């Protein structure tokens, strides 16, 4: 049997890799930290946009439900601010939560918005009543924004006097007081 002479450095490679060196590990961690530093601020904007869209969609759904139930039940249905989830509040802002109310029956309950978010009606309306014809008592425009920390995004949910709802993006992000 003839035995080939293999240099020692080749024998080590034939056995497989020995692991990472400290330099390779540090380079990998540095690249990972740079990627995270770039990705996190972009993700914050996406997360904010998603949260604003969720609040706007919930408010639109509440308006559409109130209008359709008023038509279906042939009774006035109310979309209003509610802090307890059972009764309409006469004062307060929409970020405390809202309900859709037909008589004494709560059809939909929306909990309070997360801290730092504001849902404000520029006219100060805290109650919207939809008549059995589906027509609302008055138009409303509710601005949804992040008040703390401030951001460059906001949403405006418009509910017309006819009960039609629409959402518009605002780029100034200014919260109505």
Image: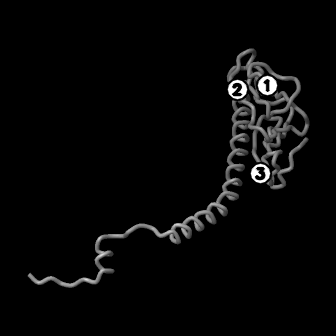
Q: Are marks 1 and 3 in contact (CB under 8 Å)?
A: no
Left or right of 54 on screen, residue 121: right
Q: Are marks 2 and 3 in contact (CB under 8 Å)?
A: no
Q: Is residue 36 above or below residue 174?
A: below
The label nearer to you, 1 versus 3, is: 1
Q: Which residue is mark 1?
A: 82
Q: Are marks 1 and 2 in contact (CB under 8 Å)?
A: yes
Q: Is residue 112 above or below residue 2?
A: above
On-image quarter of the N terminus: bottom left
Q: How far apart, in angstroms, are the residues tagged by discs 2 and 3?
A: 25 Å
Q: Which label is found at residue 112? A: none
Q: Which residue is mark 3?
A: 169
Q: Along the polypeptide, which appears first: circle 1 or circle 3? A: 1
Q: What colouring method underlies this structural image? A: one colour
Quarter occupied by residue 140: top right
Q: How far apart, in angstroms, are the residues tagged by discs 1 and 2?
A: 9 Å
Identity of the residue drawn at 73% across and 36% down: 59
Q: Is residue 9 above or below residue 78?
A: below
């Amino acid at each position: 049997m003839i035995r080939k002479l293999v240099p020692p450095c080749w024998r080590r490679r034939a056995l497989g890799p020995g692991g990472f060196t400290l330099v390779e590990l540090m380079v990998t961690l540095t690249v990972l930290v740079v990627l995270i530093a770039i990705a996190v601020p972009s993700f914050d904007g996406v997360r904010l946009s998603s949260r604003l869209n969720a609040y706007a969609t919930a408010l639109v759904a509440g308006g559409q439900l109130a209008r359709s139930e008023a038509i279906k039940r042939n009774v006035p249905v109310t979309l209003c601010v509610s802090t307890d989830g059972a009764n309409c509040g006469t004062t307060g802002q929409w970020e405390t939560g809202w309900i859709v109310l037909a008589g004494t029956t709560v059809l939909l309950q929306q909990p309070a918005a997360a801290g730092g978010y504001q849902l404000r009606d520029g006219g100060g309306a805290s109650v919207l009543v939809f008549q059995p014809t589906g027509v609302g008592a008055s138009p409303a425009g509710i601005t949804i924004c992040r008040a703390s920390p401030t951001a460059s995004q906001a949403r405006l949910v418009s509910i017309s006097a006819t009960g039609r709802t629409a959402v518009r993006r605002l780029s100034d992000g200014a919260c109505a007081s």
